[in-house]
Image (cartoon, rainbow, N blue to C red):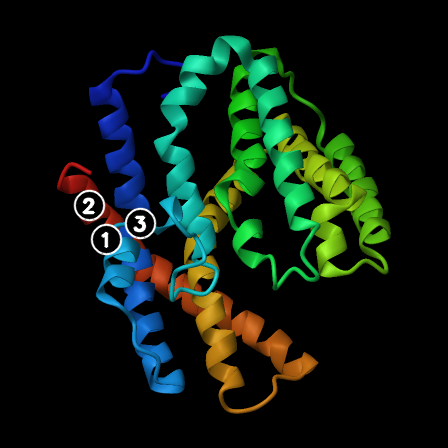
Amino acid sequence: QTFSSEITPARFARYMKRRAGRIAPLFVGVLALSIAGKIATSHNDISAAQILSNATLLFGLYDPSDTPVIGGWSIGIEMVFYLILPYLIIARKSAAALMAIVLLVSWQTTAGLAQFPSLEAGWKSYVGPSNHFIFFASGAFMALLATRRSAQPGWRLLLSLGLMSVAIAWICSGKSELDLVTSWARLALVGISILVVYLSSQWKPPIAAITACDRLGGLSYAMYLIHPLVFFGASVFGAVSGGAMAALFFVCIAIASLVDIYLDRPTQALVKRLGW
């Protein structure tokens, strides 16, 4: 709705308040746990500047990898994308030109990343907003095409997803981590992921599926932030085997469900009552 409207400072401020209100409470809670765990296990000090930049969700503006939260880099660049949303709205009348620029930036970032000997060595480049902006811009581009989409039967979606799963398995076979994010495999995997979202948006699911997806959607944020704490916490006590890994996955689902129901949802209700 915001994307289809004219941008004004007041409207953009309300949008950012809603996004911050949705993301910040649980992130700050996991941030506190992550800092405590890092100090307890590695005895590393966390600077006040790092804590402040993470608590305000602004760390993505200078270094998305500068966060104690495992996987928190994606939250950092997410906030960067929200901040540049007005420019996407301004450029929406030239969507094709916008996507051309996005593709050029993505290609240049990928080419730079390919110069590193490994993904670990080029991690700061990989987690940069420019390397992932294509996903956010593609979502905005799909919003422009929303009125042109027509509903597709579920069997066609399932068949397409099945074929793409086979393609993903073939693309990933024998590739290193760096190959997957720099070579032709990067182009193919990005294209497939965008296509999956586009095809899914054309599906008109039954009410039961909508309810299930809504429930899973609410759970996904808690699951994303909680599961690294569980897996790395378990690894402190020894190597995690394949069987234990599977068991921990279900433990993560259970913990994330509890966090979602008894912490995140009540917090969100409070945040909305406060006008966020």
Can residue 269 be seen here? The reply is: yes
Q: Residues within 10 Å of mark 2 (few under 14, many from 20)?
A: some
> Residue 241: where, in percent of width, then height?
66, 84
Rounded to the nearest whole Å, what is the CA distance between mark 2 and mark 3? 17 Å
Residue positioned most to the left:
274
Mark 2 — residue? 271
Q: Residues within 10 Å of mark 3 (few under 14, many from 20)?
A: many
Residue positioned most to the bottom:
237
Q: Residue at x 73, y 44 (%)?
A: 186
Which quadrant is the N terminus positioned in? top left
Rounded to the nearest whole Å, what is the CA distance between mark 3 and mark 1? 18 Å
> Residue 153: where, in percent of width, then height?
72, 27
Mark 3 — residue? 57
- Is the residue under label 3 in contact with that under label 2 (CB below 8 Å)? no
> What SS does tag 1 mark?
helix
Q: Amino acid at mark 1?
A: Thr
Residue positioned most to the top:
93
Q: Earlier in the sequence, mark 3 or mark 1?
A: 3
Q: Amino acid at mark 2?
A: Val
Q: Residue at x 65, y 60 (%)?
A: 119
Image-based side of 237 in relation to 200, left or right:
left
Rounded to the nearest whole Å, what is the CA distance between mark 1 and mark 2? 6 Å
